[in-house]
Amino acid sequence: MLAILNITAPIFMIMAMGYFSVRFNLFDREQLAGMGKFVLKIGLPMLVFHAIATKPLAEVIRPAYLAGYALASVLSFFAGWAVSKLRGQNGIQASLNGLGTGMSNTGFIGYPLLAMAFRSAAGVYFAMNVLVENLLILPLMLAMIDAAQGGADWRSLAVRIVKNLLKNPMIIAMIIGLVFAMLSIPVPVAIDKVTNMLATASSPLA
């Protein structure tokens, strides 16, 4: 119990600091939006790149973990979808609820918890989580919504999914990091320091 409290307590303390910062008007809505953009578009992509590019490929891709996380995510997705359908919601609403149950809040809650529990290995697990969520759960949600709308043009859906993925900074960072890992390219010292600094800022800010 004490070990769990030691992992989760700092997260709730930082969340409380965030709450009171807003409560007493230390930050306005635009500033908070800017912080969120930094986390999602700069900090976490740098974390993903650093976690992948600085480790051997065998340490980055762990099939057992990927399979377990993917299975749990898909089962959670369809559980949320099924409950929504039983409650009489339409296919679009059910698919969105499936996304809500099947896709973890990895960026803002998941990674800080991973960092507390796994420390230096957290970035690797975070990268694998992002991979599953963006290549499996998000496309699954889009496909379910398309099916609920009676769509049958799977080719255009696939093109749209690929375009969205290639615009995602975390996916771009993951692809570049995998190139470094697969080809055993050493990360230049300056880039290593910059990505590590930005990655370190992501957890508390998230």
Image: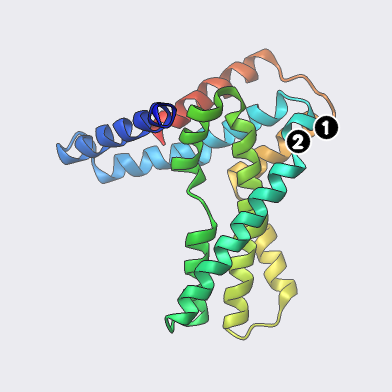
- Mark 2 and mark 1 in contact? Answer it, CB < 8 Å: yes
Query: Which residue lies at the image location 35% right of the left edge and 30% below the top edge?
Result: 9
- Is residue 171 toward the left or the right of residue 97 in the image? right
Query: Which residue lies at the image location 74% right of the left edge and 38% below the top edge?
Result: 62
Q: Position of residue 156 (x, y in %)?
A: 70, 72
Q: Position of residue 120 (x, y in %)?
A: 59, 23
For the residue labelled by badge 1, is the local secondary structure a helix, a strand or a loop?
A: helix
Question: At label 1, which amino acid type do we have?
Answer: Met
Query: Which residue lies at the image location 57% right of the left edge and 83% below the top edge?
Result: 149
Q: Which mark is residue 56?
A: none
Q: Report whether residue 95 is seen.
A: no
- Residue at the outermost left position: 24
Q: Position of residue 6 (x, y in %)?
A: 40, 26
Residue denoted by label 2: 178
| Quadrant for the C terminus in the image | top left
Instruction: Say above or below: 48 vs 187.
Output: below
Mark 1: few/some/many CA within 10 Å (<14, 14-19, 20+): some
Q: Residue 182 carries which label?
A: 1
- Is residue 199 toward the left or the right of residue 64 in the image? left
For the residue labelled by badge 2, is the local secondary structure a helix, a strand or a loop?
A: helix
Instruction: Say above or below: 19 vs 50.
Output: below
Question: At label 2, which amino acid type do we have?
Answer: Leu
Mark 2: few/some/many CA within 10 Å (<14, 14-19, 20+): many
- Residue at the outermost front position: 1
- Is residue 4 toward the left or the right of residue 47 in the image? left
Query: Which residue lies at the image location 52% right of the left edge and 20% below the top edge?
Result: 197
